[in-house]
Image: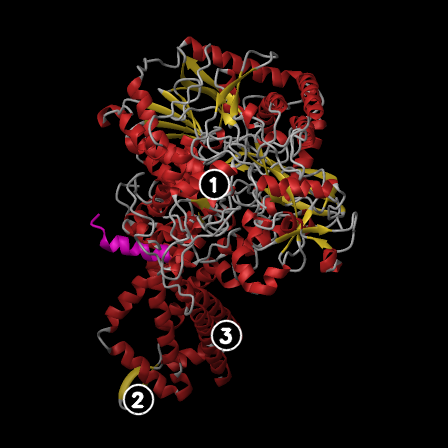
Amino acid sequence: MIATHNYFTSSIGKKQIMALTGFGLIGFVLTHLAGNFFILVGPDAFNYYAYKLTSNPLIYVAEAVLAGMFIGHIVLAVLLKLQNMGARPQSYFTKVRTGRGETIASGTMPYTGLILMIFLILHLLNFKFGTEYYTVVDGVKMRDLYKTVIEYFANPLYVAWYVFAMLCLGLHTSHGFQSMFQTWGLNHKKYTPAIQTLSSAYGIFVALGFSGLAIYCYFQN
Amino acid sequence: MSKEITVHLKIWRQKNRQDSGRFEEYTLNGVSQDQSFLEMLDQLNVKLVRDGKEPVAFDSDCREGICGSCSCMINGQAHGPEKETTTCQLHMRSFNDNDTIVIEPWRARAFPVIKDLVVDRSSFDKVIASGGFVSVNTGNAPDASAVLVSKENADKAMDAAACIGCGACVASCPNASAMLFVSAKISHLALLPQGQVEAQKRANSMVKTMDEMGFGNCTNHAECEASCPKGIDLSNIARMNREYFKAKIASEE
Amino acid sequence: MSFDLDSKIPEGPIQEKWTKHKFDSKLVNPANKRKYSVIVVGTGLAGASAAASLAELGYNVKSFCYQDSPRRAHSIAAQGGINANKNYQNDGDSTWRLFYDTVKGGDYRAREANVYRLAEVSGNIIDQCVAQGVPFAREYGGYLTNRSFGGAQVSRTFYAKGQTGQQLLIGAYQSMMRQVGLGKIQMYARREILDIVVIDGKARGVIVRDLVTGDIERHVADAVILASGGYGNVYFLSTNAMGSNVGAAWKAYKKGAGFANPCFTQIHPTCIPQSGDHQAKLTLMSESLRNDGRVWVPKEKGDKRHPNDIPEEERDYYLERIYPAFGNLVPRDVASRQAKFRVDENKGVGNTGVAVYLDFAEAIKRDGRDTIAAKYGNLFEMYQRITDESPYEQPMRIYPAVHYTMGGLWVDYNLQSTIPGLHVLGEANFSDHGANRLGASALMQGLADGYFVIPYTLGHYFGKNEIKKVDTTHPEFQKSEDEVRARTKKFLGINGSRSADEFHRALGKIMWENVGMSRNEQGLKKAISDIQQLRKEFWEDLRVPGTNEELNNELEKAGRVADFLELGELMARDALTREESCGGHFREESQTPENEALRDDEKFAHSAVWEFKGENQEPVRHREELKFEHVPLTQRSYK
């Protein structure tokens, strides 16, 4: 390493950028879920929401930022994982968790992350770049995304995969959310327990929210 | 009160740094449960020497849980199963008759094995040498009471300074990260006015050296905290993260 | 070789001696300091503070320790605290009082001028440590707090939880590592000193073994400092670290350094008793426990009832009974001896009957469990971890154990031994504690020597002497290395049947029984012949597996035990010739009607300094007379 320690290549710097991008993604997931709830209102509402969202020219900026966050998060994750594996060239023959530290969520971060990456690609292919139906709402022609969604979730296997991925998302974010505070140095005797509770609540909420909607769609067929 | 038990030991044997190493198994009878874990290993070694075999090399010195020499991954846990207990303070009453006990050295790139259960932890000294101090020469000091320190901060600094540098944090971390060790020192000194002056410079150089030594990254599992024989907690890592970020914004490098 | 025991105490009133001496000392100009090199053996409080301070001044320092890191030196295990003359508590402390207490506590067998200097610089140590970031305990107002400790009637002890030694050592270690980072100290860890090299009458280097590779290395310097600690491990069971050894000091003795008062050992009263033969070392419980704990045994002999079942009126709080003024806070030697007397009377407690109780029931009742837990929680946990008994529920069992050695290499006021250029600091020297060390004084002495004495006196040595240029090719280095190699070869070649530990255990038993808390002529003579016999067996029946060219714990132990087998004999000889009782040295032939140590100031107001005369030859006893001009010689009384 060169004389000046580069923040962006330092262990802590990388983690903090992970946390920052993670924070952005957590926000995105929440708004995405909020949008999805339009499904419950009805096809027109959902389609109109999607239309409004995608027809705003700022969407390209938002998508670029979002893509940047995803790519940044993933690239750093891979980099950190490789480094961490390199930090222990020979692993233990017996390794038992103390039960007081590592949790299922924290221990599976790379794996849930990997699943989410696969999910993300499929998700984009299935929906954003999926079958395009059209409909007219209030005299405006727009994509009938509602139909694409309902059609997709007609297949129980797809529902199952989706629910599984969303459980991974819940697990991933339930650790990631609180972890982010720690990485940014926001650890406080009084508030940290609350953040940990909030973090778990967030994970459960998004997992149940997305999965619930998928199951709801299944029953619309 | 004291009971004698038999234990089956599966111990990592490695001749030197280059050797690839392997497990060897031993059965030891007549182990008193009042014995400490290391006294049990002493007993094994006496037996091995008597049988003309090579004794198991392990580090230990004070045997009071304060020097930080002893190590050992015992049944997959750093310093064994008891909370806030070093290997030397672990007693055989934590084990039952006919238990199998697997003993491995700390494993990390930055802690190469020297022999059997003995590892080289000089990377910790290098991290301290790069900034884990207050730059004060002998004779510089003003009167001890001239600078007040709040009891709260003095106590927190003490808690961080209780680190014995054993390396259990690195050993138990799934990523072999040294952040608990490094952050304990950064915290200890940053919490005191005497150390605050160069807190940012310290955070910068210690993190840099830590990275160069080949330790892994922190992924906030808290296994280090759970394994630490001195109960050093994660808030220290948070403080280090904060100090480091501040140092990076403030520094002109 | 002439044996020069000139203490070089400066002239003038005792309060001005050190100031005057510093002024009269030669200086080395800053530019020239970097031309000098110093070897420092040991990285405990004395060694680390010396190495750091000397490097800060500009000297080039090479530092050695046998541990894997200098931070692990055994000073780290000191629990209670460190004394200083600050008088922050407004309770009447002063330099004079600390000086007075230390001379008296040492039972008048220490040099007044040295002790006065120690008291004088004690305050600076606290300043220095605070500046380094040592987190001493504080009051809510942010000021430093103190406690009373080890029989002192003023509160002058500074502490950091029950880990004062650790915190002070880490402070010194950090200062030292700063100099390592700056390149002024070269650190050699995992190295054992196997010989001291003396050239033209001056200490010029060491021969060391790299404990990982077995390489024998030569290191040369302009002066050598030994800060290698005490020799309590001669008893096998002690509170010393497993690796603590007398090797470096013993090699210096054999090269002409006088060994002073080797029989002065401190048996600490509050240790966890031995539980069985498997035991490898004993654990100290801080003396601070005696501030709140009450020591007792059953009045009835052989009473095997559970302590909680013994009613108040059937308990003998013997320290409070015998010493109403000091009660449970009598000095260590007194408390230890009284415990031994109780056990000898068959009033000892626990399974083995070799222990007394230290009871916190009353303190818990008075102050509440939380208060007691805040003060001693970590010690109670440690006790419970080892014994599986909770001191909150039942009294602790304690018994004395070997803890510290007041004796050591003789040094003058400049901390220089009888070998010019060989300076000795900390527990390794004999200087300041006389025949008994007071609690919280060891840390003070180690740091005083390292931070505030040696930086001046070493400069004086360099300024006054011409140090000729030599390198490691000098024939003396070759000779030393040859001897070291021959000895190692000998260890490996005996191929007997017993391990070094077995001999060590046997030696420890001889020492504890005959040269322990209570000594008599017959026992000491027996010890000398028993040790000679054991030594003979050692060299015939030792077994060291493995080779030199690897990490070989057994080989290390063999070397250390070989030294102890010689030292033990010298200790017995010293105890035999000191026909008086003083401090920790209790000769049964010399006691008051109340079984207190009875000094013989007419004949023994001196330090005994032993000169090595060759292998298997009787060493010669010299004396340095002690003058007490400021602290009048009185019989110590703690009643």
Report whether B227 appears left or right of C348. Answer: left
User: Do the residues under discs 1 and 2 have CB atoms within 8 angstroms?
Assistant: no
* Residue C603: image location, x then y, percent: 56, 23
Report whether residue C547 is seen. yes
Identify the residue under disc 3.
A159
The residue lying toward the viewer, choosing from C79 and A150, is C79
Q: Nearer the viewer, mark 1 or mark 2?
A: 1
Task: Say which quarter of the image contains residue C462.
Answer: top left
- What kind of residue is marked 2? Val
The circle drawn on residue B145 is none
The residue tagged with tag 3: helix, strand or loop? helix
How far apart marks 3 and 1 lie (CA) works out to: 84 Å
Report whether A145 appears left or right of A172. Answer: left
Q: Magenta segment range?
A: B239-253
The circle drawn on residue C101 is 1
How far apart marks 1 and 2 lie (CA) works out to: 98 Å
Task: Please say if C360 is above or below C259.
Answer: below
